[in-house]
Image: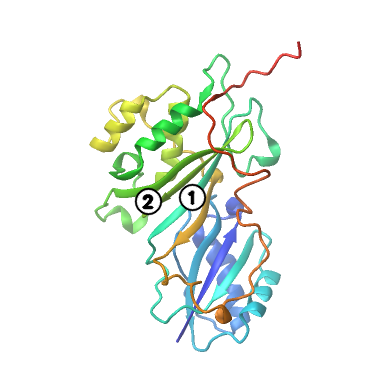
């Protein structure tokens, strides 16, 4: 049997999570092209309903290798719906396990514009300031983010697992290597989160907590206590779970030399010409966080 690995990007708006992407689009299309009825697809990350992906990785086994990976990439993308794109295909070693990752990176967008933005509403959490509310303090949120770096128990930031995982004991120890806030526009903030593993809805709960910190509704000390004790003391200090549609699974990381696309160049598909951060970095370059608050007040013309 031959292993085949695919890097997949998709707009999760109309999908009920990875299972829907797999069963309604990828698997039937691959089966048709490869003339193989049973095609089990394993995936590195099972995204939830509404979550987008720029670089999820899946793999399958088949009796013989595809003749032309570049042609297979092209044919797949001709047949797949516009919400799904295979960006790369490779033939990794036979012992490759798509689930043996060393890390993942997620990106989340929050827009603090005073009015809703219809054109970007499907890809960002829009948090307009309430009348009389304090301006969003990005510097305070960035400081809170720095306190969460490293290995901690993130039990306070994980929701109850799904399905069969509900019965299994949960290891809440996770290591965050990156938790950055980047200001993309005067009102849009990008959260970049990279870690070795994540609990169910952990990224969305972290974003929700940092938004509350910036709003002055959650203190740094409460965050530290939650990391140490595994829970929030006050019921009204619980983090908001940020909505799914603002989240993008940006990339999957493997140990050096063990990734599905670390193989020889001749075994790699031509790929698709996409911008490196296509779904994530809309317009303009990333700028380091500037220590100032984002206010909902409009400037006076006078």
Asked whether, in this view, residue 132 is left or right of residue 199, the answer is: right
Image mark for residue 106: 1
* In the displayed structure image, the side of residue 28 where residue 218 appears, left or right: left
Disc 2 is placed on an element classified as: loop
Q: Disc 2, disc 1: CB below 8 Å?
A: yes
* Relative to 253, residue 51 above or below: above
Residue 166 visible (yes or no): yes
Q: Residues within 10 Å of mark 1 (few under 14, many from 20)?
A: many
Q: Position of residue 127 (x, y in %)?
A: 56, 30
Q: Residue at x 68, y 76 (%)?
A: 75
Q: Residue 211 or 236: which is nearer the viewer? A: 211
Question: Helix, strand, or loop for circle 1?
Answer: strand
The location of residue 100, given as percent across then percent down, is 37, 67
Residue 131, image x, y percentages: 58, 16
Q: Nearer the viewer, residue 76 or 263?
A: 263
Among numbered discs 2 and 1, the one appearing first in the sequence = 1
Q: Residue at x 51, y 71 (%)?
A: 261
Of the pair 108 and 184, the residue shown nearer to us: 184
Report the front residue among 221 and 36. Answer: 221
Give percent across and percent down for residue 107: 52, 47
Q: What residue is disc 2 on?
A: 198
Left or right: where 194 falls relative to 86:
left
Q: Name the residue at 55% across, 62% down.
A: 21
């Amino acid at each position: 049997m031959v292993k085949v690995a695919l890097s997949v990007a998709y707009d999760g708006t109309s999908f009920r999570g990875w299972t829907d992407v797999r069963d309604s689009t990828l698997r039937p299309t691959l089966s048709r092209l490869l003339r193989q009825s049973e095609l089990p697809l394993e995936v590195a990350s099972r995204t939830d309903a509404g979550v987008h992906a720029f670089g999820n990785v899946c793999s399958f086994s088949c009796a013989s290798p595809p003749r032309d990976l570049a042609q297979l990439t092209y044919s797949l993308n001709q047949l797949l719906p516009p919400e799904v794109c295979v960006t790369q295909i490779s033939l990794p070693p036979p012992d490759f396990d798509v689930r043996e990752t060393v890390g993942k990176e997620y990106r989340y967008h929050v827009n603090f514009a005073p009015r809703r933005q219809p054109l970007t509403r499907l890809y960002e959490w829009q948090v307009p300031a309430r009348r009389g509310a304090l301006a969003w303090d990005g510097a305070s949120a960035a400081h809170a983010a720095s306190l969460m770096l490293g290995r901690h128990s993130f039990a306070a930031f994980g929701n109850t697992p799904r399905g069969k995982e509900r019965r299994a004991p949960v290891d809440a120890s996770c290591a965050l290597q990156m938790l950055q806030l980047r200001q993309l526009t005067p009102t849009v903030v990008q959260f970049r989160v990279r870690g070795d593993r994540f609990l169910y809805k952990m990224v969305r709960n972290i974003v929700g907590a940092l938004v509350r910190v910036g709003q002055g509704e959650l203190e740094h000390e409460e965050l530290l206590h939650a990391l140490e004790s595994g829970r929030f003391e006050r019921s009204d200090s619980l983090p908001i779970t940020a909505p799914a549609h603002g989240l993008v699974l940006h990339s999957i990381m493997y140990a050096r030399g063990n990734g599905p696309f670390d193989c020889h160049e001749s075994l790699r598909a031509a790929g698709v010409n996409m911008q490196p951060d296509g779904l994530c970095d809309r317009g303009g370059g990333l700028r380091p966080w500037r220590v100032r608050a984002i206010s909902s007040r409009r400037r006076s013309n006078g």
